[in-house]
Amino acid sequence: ECNLYQFMQDRAKLFSETEVRTWCFQVFQALAYMHQHGYFHRDLKP
């Protein structure tokens, strides 16, 4: 188990644009789902 920061630090090469797009899309889908069900998150950081 690790967080994204640890994962990035342990990785030898940069992430591809495709990988980053996939992760962003998944985060946006999750946020849309939460918003559709009346929840929101006020502490998102880039």
Image (cartoon, rainbow, N blue to C red):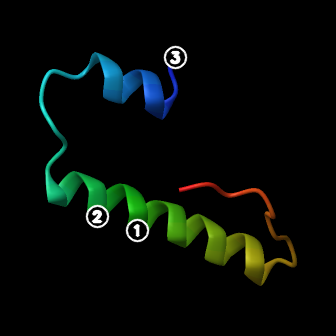
User: Which residue is under mark 3?
Assistant: 1
The numbered disc on residue 34 is: none
CA neighbours of label 1 inside 10 A, class few (<14), some (14 to 19), many (20+): few
Instruction: Specify whether 42 is left or right of 24.
Output: right
Please tell me which of labels 3 and 1 falls first in the chain.
Answer: 3
Are the residues tagged 2 and 1 within 8 Å (C-beta)? yes
Residue type at mark 2: give it. Answer: Arg
The amino acid sitting under disc 1 is: Phe
Say whether disc 3 or disc 2 marks the residue closer to the N-terminus: 3
Q: Name which residue lies at 28% across and 64% down.
A: 21
- Which amino acid does the dot numbered 3 rest on? Glu
Residue ID for mark 1: 25
Residue at image position (15%, 21%) is 12
Vertical position of residue 7 compared to residue 37: above or below = above
CA distance separating discs 3 and 2: 22 Å
Determine whether the residue tagged by mark 3 lies in a helix, strand or loop: loop
Classify mark 3: residues with Cα within 10 Å, few (<14), some (14-19) or many (20+): few
Q: Nearer the viewer, mark 3 or mark 2?
A: 2
> What residue did someone put label 2 on?
21
- Assign a secondary structure to mark 2: helix
Say which element carries label 1. helix
Nearer the observer, 28 or 43 = 43
Q: CA distance from mark 3 to mark 1?
A: 22 Å
Occupied quadrant, residue 26: bottom left
